[in-house]
Image (tube, rainbow, N blue to C red):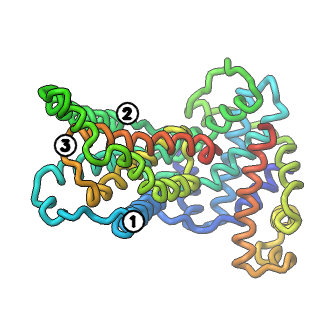
Amino acid sequence: MQTHDLIEALAADTGRVPANGLERRLTLTALAGVGVALALVLVWLKPRADLGEAVDGGFFWIKAFYTGALGLAGVWATARLARPDMSVRATALIALAVVGVFEIAALVQFTPMDAGSRLAALRGVSWQVCSRNIVLLAAPMLAMSIAALRWMAPTRPMAAGFAAGVFSGGAAATVYGLHCPEATFVFVGLWYTLGVAACGVIGAVAGRHLLRW
Amino acid sequence: MDDLEAQLKRLMLLGLDGDAGAHRRLLRLLSDRLRAYFMHRMSSAPADVEDLVQETLLAVHLRRESYDRTQPLTAWVFAIARYRLIDHWRRRKIRVTTPMGDVAEFLAADTVAPDDGLDLTRALASLPPRQRALVENVKITGLSLSEAGAKAGLSEGAAKVALHRALKLLAERMRRANA
């Protein structure tokens, strides 16, 4: 088949492409993904019983800012990696700095503790389910993000998938804060961070298989 | 060179707004540039050049939404061409020794005459009959999309959707052809 003929077929398929299509797709993904995660927390996990008092406390918001910042870094990187040849070094550095500051706070909290309190702080009341729940809450949004990226041209499919995972994981972890009563830097720095990182790894594997073109 | 960028970008923006004539002119101009670029990089396998040109045109067309209208058009096309080239080498297990070149070279290369694309011919033959008929009628016999659709028993809207799907499938089949 000749290139000339192919061009005729492509021209017949011209159609209109909306401006800011990428931004629209990512906004829709965020709204729908957070909506699904919220519904899962309300119906399945249930909001924490002391939610009314918790929102008056500082740590509830520190936790939300931490995971929210990771989600924002994730969506920013996703938007850049959706287009060919865009650098995400600045975004990656910001995300690493956010994690770094939080982990330093966790170490400051952890170091003066005695052995018994250390174990208690690491385990909290929900260490066995925390990371897993974040991954489960993020899964629908991650699937939507990968679907949105399939319209784009990511020249680094694994990196784009990882960014989509951090986007979804950060958003889901923020919603999960409505259910989870844990309130230490040590616990959140370990299990929340692991949950978001796991979303990133799952996204990278999905990207490797689904975002190549 | 700046003239070419300005001309290509103008055609791209018109095409994004639905101007099929501008889109056709853009793809024709790009196909010349792409052929010259790949020819320089593929002297060991000139038979693959046209396959790469066609794969890149399909990608440029199907992934138009990823173009940021505030950025230079040629840089975006060049990034797509380079990705297709690297993927091609990876699939054929060719160790890369040729430098990738840059946008300036991409714009400056001489044009060369096209060849037949064998991968695309094969990919087209593998499509479901209705989709294949639609693509063939639109391209070879020069029918309009609504006429080609009517021949296949499709409304104009359905023909639009079917053609787009067929093109996506073509791109996917070409990519898998040598995997």
Residue A100 in the image: x percent, y percent? 25, 32
Q: What residue type is labelled 2?
A: Arg
Instruction: Please tell me whether mark 2 or mark 1 is closer to you in this view.
Output: 1
- How far apart in space, not on screen, are marks 1 and 3 (Cα)? 24 Å
User: Is residue B148 placed above or below A84 in the rendered structure?
Assistant: below
The image shows residue A69 at horizontal and vertical percentages of 28, 47
- In this picture, is A157 found above or below A134? above
Q: Which chain carries label 2?
A: A
Residue occupied by mark 2: A89
Tell which residue pokes out farthest to the top in this image.
B97
Which badge, 2 or 1, comes first in the chain's sequence? 1
Report, in whole angstroms, how far the alpha carbon at label 2 lies from the one at label 3.
30 Å
- Image mark for residue A44: 1
Q: Which of marks 2 and 3 is nearer the N terminus?
A: 2
Query: How far apart are labels 2 and 1 at the CA level?
Result: 38 Å
Residue drawn at point x = 56 percent, y = 40 percent: A205
Label 1 is placed on what type of residue? Trp
Q: Is mark 1 on a helix, strand or loop?
A: helix
Q: Does the rendering let one see residue B141? A: no
Question: Looking at the picture, which amino acid does disc 3 mark?
Answer: Thr
| Tag 3 subunit | A
Secondary structure at numbered mark 2 = helix
Labels 1 and 3 positioned on one and the same chain:
yes
